[in-house]
Image (cartoon, rainbow, N blue to C red):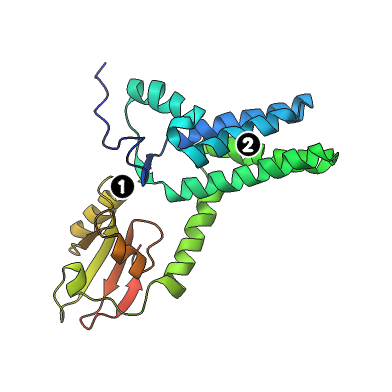
Amino acid sequence: MPLPLPRTANPYRDLAVIDARAPRVNQLLTGLLALSALLTGAWPLVAVAAVQISTGLLFGRRWCLACRIYFGLIQPAFGEGPVEDARPVKFANQVGAAFLWASTLAHLVGLHAAGNVLAGTVAALALLAATTGFCAGCVIYRGWAFVRGVRGGIPGRLDLAEVGGTPGLQAVVQFTHPLCADCRTLSARLSGEGRAPLLVDVSKRPDLARKYGVSVVPLALSILPDGRVERRIH
């Protein structure tokens, strides 16, 4: 059996990205705790799940039990999975934590039916994500980022010289991150189509990411010779 390849992203330092399989372990743990609370009536398990997620959000991945299990045991044995933008995952965790704390509060004040509905929602969505990879919170984040990027954050014009292009020539500009697997796939596809993009590394140019409202990578834009944004490619 071949040895796993060395990982490209350090899980505790490269916080802008994350191994796409790691959140599924966290979702599995969260979903099982919430489901156990529903099946047994032991609602404090909901609070345990809330604490587990919130600790990781507040203090970092080293304090996240599911992260320690994945990065310490599973990833070394099976290798690194696809690396993706960590922001959608973080948003999904924040939403999950909010639901779990709301469920805990509802149980504390005696509103057990409401608490069970909130916990059941988390259990269903977390286990769906763990088993299929479909993350509802991530979809909401990307949808919000897309709407914000198209309608507000990205201006109608982009300075081609600022991103390494030549004013007066049409170009494709891609905002990327060196550890983002989807970014590499997109740039390779565009190059194969004869549209090699100008790459803007958001880890080195966060100022440009802020200026143009880039909320998630990869993001590719078709730019006209005068600098106007013609359309969003991806």
Indicate which label's residue lies in the foreground, 2 or 1. Answer: 2
Q: Residue 221 appears at what percent x and percent y?
A: 30, 68
77 in relation to 106, above or below: above
Judged from this view, the residue extending furthest toward the right is 110
Q: Which residue bears the numbered disc 1?
A: 180
Asked if residue 121 shows in the view, the reply is no
22 over 17 or under it: above or below: above
Q: Is 54 located above or below residue 156 in the figure? A: above
- The residue lying at 46 percent from left, 62 percent from top is 145
Judged from this view, the residue extending furthest toward the left is 166
- Image quadrant assignment for residue 206: bottom left
Rounded to the nearest angstrom, the CA distance separating label 2 from label 1 is: 29 Å
- Which of the pair 187/50 is nearer the observer? 50
As helix, strand or loop, the secondary structure at mark 1 comes to: loop
- Dot 2 crowding, Cα within 10 Å, few <14, some 14–19, many 20+: many
**Residue ID at (46%, 74%):** 151
Q: Quadrant of residue 109?
A: top right
Q: Is residue 103 left or right of residue 173?
A: right
Q: Which residue is mark 2?
A: 50
Q: Residues within 10 Å of mark 1 (few under 14, many from 20)?
A: many
Decide if residue 67 is in sight here.
Answer: yes
Which of the two discs, 2 and 1, labels the residue nearer the N terminus? 2
The amino acid at mark 1 is Cys
x and y, in percent, of residue 72 in the image: 39, 23
* Residue 57 in picture, x, y percent from top left: 51, 41
Q: Is residue 18 left or right of residue 89?
A: left
Quadrant in which the C terminus appears: bottom left
